[in-house]
Amino acid sequence: MFFITCDSMFTEIFNNSYVILGLIFLSVTLTTALLVIIGQGLLASYETRYTGRMGGMMEELFIFQNAKIIFWINMIGALLAVLFCMLLSRNVLLTIIAGVIGFNIPRIFLFFARKRRYEKFDRQFVDALNVLANGLRSGMTLVQSVEIVEKEFSPPLSQEFGLALRENRLGVPIEDALVNMSKRIPNDDLRLVTISINTVFTLGGNLVELFTNIAVLIRERAKFEKKTKALTAQGKMQGIVVGFLPTGLGILLFFADPSLMNYMFGTAVGIIALVAMILLQLIGFFLIQKITAIEI
């Protein structure tokens, strides 16, 4: 009798639509709260890793800002790119690609800024060696010659040599401070100079001749590199055309006739063909770049 009464009571409860709606609301709320908690943990973990990497890159560029700002700029950029793509096209694949590109725009900007910084340092370094040689020739010490380089040159070379001087004032030997600079700047010539300075300080030698000879070597190699770039420019341009011309044509056709191009994004055969095309383009591009890249 008791079981019959309980069964009829539960039947009446579950036949009540308000109870069912309440249970559905409770389950959805708990699931949403659980997903939010998990998402917050994953987001915080990714934010910590991302800000660590970006903070190191920003320190290399002497940009002393909070890396969390870059992270949230990335998030806003990804959101705006997704919304913009959804307004133009409701294609899921294009929306995902737009979100990834929007999220990585600040990172791409910092990557090219760092590349330009290294290239400018390479151009300044030859003249800095001549200044160091002239300073030593006039009777100055290496530290005094480095101070002249810091004052006479513009960033990034003045920043890097200035940091080496600050390390020296804190008790680090100047040769070790220059070694630390060579670890921050991926420059083979700088690494050669620092190794040579340590050798001279350990075994003896003439720093004036060392700086002069290395400067001459760098200039002659730069001339040869320019000639090589001029001879391989046509092959590199072919690689760029092979890599980007089909993509450009696809974008133009998409805006000219979206219904025709939707077959490429909305069907399995089209997606497979699109992936194969991208892979073949990348293979052709990198093969041509590899052939025309000559190490000096």
Image (spheres, helix red, strand yellow):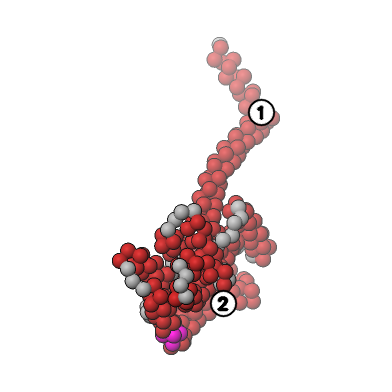
| Marker disc for residue 200 | none
Name the spot of residue 220 as percent of width and height, x first: 41, 84
Q: Does residue 293 appear anywhere in the picture?
A: no
Q: Which stretch appears magenta?
A: 223-228
Q: Extreme front residue here?
A: 139
The residue closer to the viewer here, 105 or 10, is: 105
In 3D space, how far apart are the residues under numbered discs 1 and 2 (Cα atoms)? Answer: 57 Å
> Does residue 102 belong to the magenta stretch?
no
- Disc 1 residue type (three-letter): Val
Q: Does residue 48 appear anywhere in the picture?
A: yes
Q: Which of pointers 1 and 2 lies earlier in the amino acid sequence?
A: 1
Other residues around mark 1 within 10 Å, as few (<14) / some (14–19) / many (≥20): few
User: Which residue has dot 1 on it?
Assistant: 19
Name the spot of residue 293 as percent of width and height, x first: 40, 79
User: Which residue has dot 2 on it?
Assistant: 248
- Residue drawn at 50 percent across, 56 percent down: 169
- Helix, strand or loop for disc 1: helix
- Residue drawn at 67 percent across, 66 percent down: 88
Give the image quarter of residue 258: bottom right
Name the spot of residue 35 as percent of width and height, x first: 57, 41
Other residues around mark 2 within 10 Å, as few (<14) / some (14–19) / many (≥20): few
- Residue drawn at 59 percent across, 15 percent down: 5
Name the spot of residue 77 as percent of width and height, x first: 63, 59
- Disc 2 residue type (three-letter): Gly
- Residue drawn at 38 percent across, 67 percent down: 197
* Left or right for 241, reference 14: left
Give the foreground label among 1 and 2.
Answer: 2
Q: Is residue 72 above or below residue 216?
A: above
* Left or right for 217, reference 170: left
Tag 1 and tag 2, C-beta contact below 8 Å = no
The residue closer to the viewer here, 18 or 251, is: 251
Where is the C terminus found, in terms of image quarters? bottom left
